[in-house]
Amino acid sequence: MILLLRKDLRTLLRTPVLLAVLLAYPLVIATLVGLVAGYASSKPRVALVDRDDLPPQIVVGNRRFDVQRTIDEVGNNVTLVRGLDAEEAERELESGRLVAVITVPPGFVATLRQMVQSPTLELAITRGGTSSRVRQQVQALVYQLNRRLQRAYIDANIEYVRLLLHGGRGKFLGEDFNVLGLEETQRELDALPADERLDRIRQFVHDARLALAQTDDALRATAAPIELHELPRRGRSAALSAQVQGYALALTLTFLCLVLAAGALAAERDENVLPRLARGLVSPTRLVAAKVALAGVVALVVGLAVAVAFGIAIDVSDVRGGEPWLRLPLLAAGLVVAGASIGAAGTLLGGIARDARTASLVAVLVVLPLVFLGLIPREVFPAAAWASDALPFTHAYRLFDASLYDLSPWGPVAREAAWLVGLGLVFAVAARAAVARPE
Amino acid sequence: MTLLRARAVARSFGRRVALEPTDLDLREGELVALVGPNGAGKSTLLSILAGALSPTDGTVERHARTGWVPQRTAHYGRLTARENLVLFARLEHAPLAEVDELLEAFELPGDVRAVRLSVGNRQRLDVALALLGSPRVLLLDEPTAALDPAQRRRLWELASALRDDGGAVLVATHHHEELEQHADRVLELVEGRLA
């Protein structure tokens, strides 16, 4: 087995073009998958139809709101299309060119300024696709606006309460008014002669003053029972996340090991060496084991190279989260197990195919469905997840992810390694039967 | 003394019968020719005798080390002739000293990858591989097909020398003119059956 493994490694190193393609292709695929994923998360087009001629700034209570800046903030999450009238926006929504239309109805600003009723924004949204994400983004936007307006509303209400307490001049619905205030009322009452009925009024005024003095905090607490305070950003960026690293490793190794093992085994038949080996020199079991070992060795070398590249990128970028260096030994063991398991699947393809070209082509064709099955969330399509459980890609990804990221990796690593070993044995036994099959 | 004995060996591929039950003995000091039209089952019989193919029925007894030259070249194209010989010498547990002897005897360029050798040289490499471990029985499946007259003559000399040393040689060939000169007996295989 060692002799054949050395022979295969020597052969591999003597075909640098093949080696380069085997390494570059999965990286290209990973990049394309990343771009597709990026497109899927690109900003949806949302129209803002302004039927109220929003001014650049609005004063609510004593607070001034920059309308333009608020609209620009919406543009951080969606591609905001402005300048459409209601009819145009409706047409584009129906044609699918817009995902949603936010309409500011007539009277919106006036209602807002009055601070008596809640003004309404109208949201029209398409079904499916990114609509749920857009809905969440618009809800988040309205939540943010409400939070700012709450402060204005609360400030205005507190101002009215202060007027009640201290007295003075105020304005409501555009009308000026003058308020005596509880303090002045109490002073006026104190100047009057003692009287039982007056004493009760004095007591009420005293209690009201005490109660209203607490209104400030109570109003703020009522408006926001729970406040969310966002901490400064920590951990890795998305591009360097353990998840991305896990997928990159699993995708690269799946392609590499599957194609390599399939091609290497089929090449034995291609070169007509299989009958020579079958003369008691190398048993089918050892032949399959040699190809599985080849996949394991290549997976270890390439996987460690990818992991080291990620580790350097993480160090250079000074990002935190995960243990890119401490977990390398655990990852190395996982790479060998995953590579061997995927390689066993490759040997099955190589054993079934009659020549190396067919084996390689079939392996390439098999890789993408195998990978995409593993990317479909279980809750979206359970059948795909079950199918994926019977294939090594998902388990390889989970193994790498746990090795690199989990605080307590031993449980998940052991479980996924057991899956990979079991699947590898099944594939290898089937491959052995295919190899032993006569021409 | 019988060096190789086959009894009722037969081979089918699915429903197709490639070789009817066949008996064959190869004894010390004989060179046997196996003739027959294409598809008669010659390669199947030789593969079974060599142990490269399991018979569907029957048994094969090998009482001596057996070398086999298949009809189609069977070695690693990306390895050099020397690397092929070293690899198979190790697999056959043959002395590595034989590698240089065989390279010299067959005038093979040791450091050239097999895929870059001429067809004739590749066939000679296969013969060299068959001789690893100094077998006493040599099974040759149309070994002269790609050889020039000089190489062909040398191969017959080699086969004759093996026979003269008490070995046994079985050669499948279409070259009837060579049989009379070299073969001790001739077997004819027709539609999977010895005639």
Image: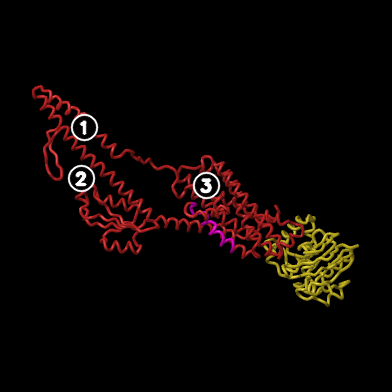
Chain colours: A red, B yellow
Q: Residue at x 23, y 42 (%)?
A: A153
Task: Please name the amino acid that badge 3 sits on.
Answer: Asp
Marks 1 and 2, how far apart at CA: 21 Å
Sequence-first disc among 3 and 1: 1
User: Which secondary structure, mark 3?
Assistant: helix
Q: Amino acid at mark 2?
A: Val
Contact between marks 3 and 2 (CB within 8 A): the answer is no
Image quarter of residue A251 = bottom right
Q: Earlier in the sequence, mark 3 or mark 2?
A: 2
- Identify which residue, A437 or A255, lies in the foreground: A437
Q: Which mark is residue B181?
A: none
Residue B95 relative to residue A183: left or right? right
As drawn, which residue projects farthest toward the bottom? B177
Residue under pointer 1: A212
Give the crowd class for mark 2: few <14, some 14-19, many >=20 residues within 10 Å: few
**What residue do we see at 87% from left, 76% from top?**
B180
- Residue A366 in magenta stretch: yes
Q: Is residue A365 visible?
A: yes
Q: Which residue is mark 2?
A: A116
Q: Which residues are magenta?
A: A361-378
